[in-house]
Image (cartoon, coloured by chain):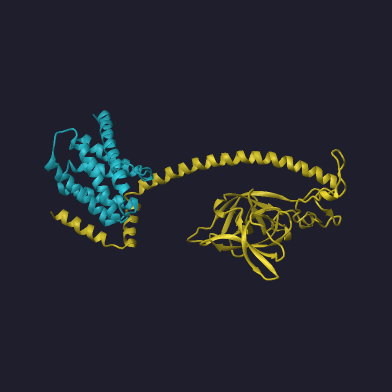
Chain colours: A yellow, B cyan
Amino acid sequence: MALIISMLLIGSFASSLSRERESQVEAIVRATVLFPVLQLHRASAEQAAVGRRAAALQDERDSLVVAMTRSRAVAEQAGDLRALAGLDEPALGSVRVAEVYPGRPRVGDPDVFVLRGTRLADLDFPVGVFTGRGLVGVARAPHGSGARGEFWTHTDFRVSVVTEDGGVSGIARSVRRDGGQPMLLLEGAPYQGNIEPGTRLVTTGIAGVYPPGIPIGTVRDLASEEAGWMKSYFVEPAVRPAETRVVLAWDRPELDSLMSIATYVPPTFDSSSVEATPGDPLPADSSGLGSVADDSVSVRNEP
Amino acid sequence: MRSRRGWVVIGLLLALHFALHPLWTGWPAGPDLLIGGLLLGSLGLRASRAALLGFILGLFEASMSLGPLGPTMLILAATGYAGSWLRDVFYSDSARFIPAFLVVGVWLVQTLLVLAGGAGLTLEGALIHSPISAGLTAVLCWGTEKLVAFFVG
């Protein structure tokens, strides 16, 4: 009987505990008696996650093979066109592969990250960090043998962008919308111009922090307009920080050689000014890559 | 159930419950081997000890599933006590007694735990998921007993 009464008392006392106190008691039991069981759960969950990750990596590899095959053909065509137009090979630099570790949401800053990879510390900071799908952020400084930087969600992040057709340019930064969900805001777009929803934005490459032509997102809708001056647009980002694991850090070339490449040259072709039949050689300025303004300074688009 | 084999069955059921907890909770109507093991155990214990077993299992279960601590402990203690008491009242040699005892017991205790958790009892949960869960529990308990009988003898 004493045992029953004791259990009733303890049970009643436990029922009167606040949720926080209950959690403390449960945490003690989880850290002691249930610890081996929970370790077992964790191990099996990790094992399952590794299996899923392996399957996802295999899919990723397969799609990369397809993308590489296509891009090789496009690169060959671009090389042919550049040769026809008499342009130098672009000095776009190279990339370094890195694993991204985001800051922890509660105890740290989720808008910053640490990159782990080889030879990252000797990059010429700041440099753009991106994936095949779009811009991820910027690496600001070395961090041990890796680097540390900010996702595009960081309040200090700014990038110069342009619509894919080269019509409208502006500066993109992060904003919080949709219940705190971060997205991009394109500012400084000309008032007279109009960007249709769904238009893709890419980096211009101005200032040499980000390589030109990296997608940053698609325009969703008009955010605001300042009469007679400029418009702002909400932009759906191409890459969400939570989706990124492996990124590419831009190992940009020397600034001198960087100056010789186009910032971003939209693919335009004025067919009205060209009359040709199949088999004809291309006219001197019909490559769609614009004209060479100077021997080595820049290549500008002149639609 | 007081035999060594019976306690091996109960131990195995409880070990399976905690080891495979994430799997059970992922199903809409998974077996509840904790209540099954407790009910089987209560048939072989004195009422106060069965209540103590339920009380301790309630502490573990609430800690594992992060449920309400006090109500879970009290309900499972009452389950152990009631199981032991009912054995004396309804004890039968019929082979159907234990499966029926398990099905009804699991159904009732699950309903009580849902009510105690404050999640709100749904008709679907009470009339479909819980009976399926109770049936699965009885089948798995029976299967475990047969398995143990095969290996332990």
Residue in the image at 17% along x and 47% along y: B82
Residue A232 visible in the shown view: yes
Above-or-below relation of A56 to A158? above
Relative side of A62 to A24, left or right: right
Residue A289, position as x, y percentages in the image: 80, 51
Relative side of A295 to A121, left or right: right
Total marks shown come to: 0
Residue in the image at 18% along x and 32% along y: B95
Residue A266, position as x, y percentages in the image: 75, 53
Relative side of B60 to A225, left or right: left
Residue B64, position as x, y percentages in the image: 34, 50
| Quarter the N terminus of chain A occupies | bottom left
Q: Residue A125 versus residue A209: which sits nearer the camera?
A: A209
Above-or-below relation of B34 to A8? above
Q: Residue A102 versus residue A241: which sits nearer the camera?
A: A241
Relative side of A288 to A27, left or right: right
Residue in the image at 23% along x and 54% along y: B74
Residue reaching furthest front?
A: A272
Residue B79, position as x, y percentages in the image: 21, 48
Residue B14 visible in the shown view: no
Q: Residue A122 versus residue A187: which sits nearer the camera?
A: A187
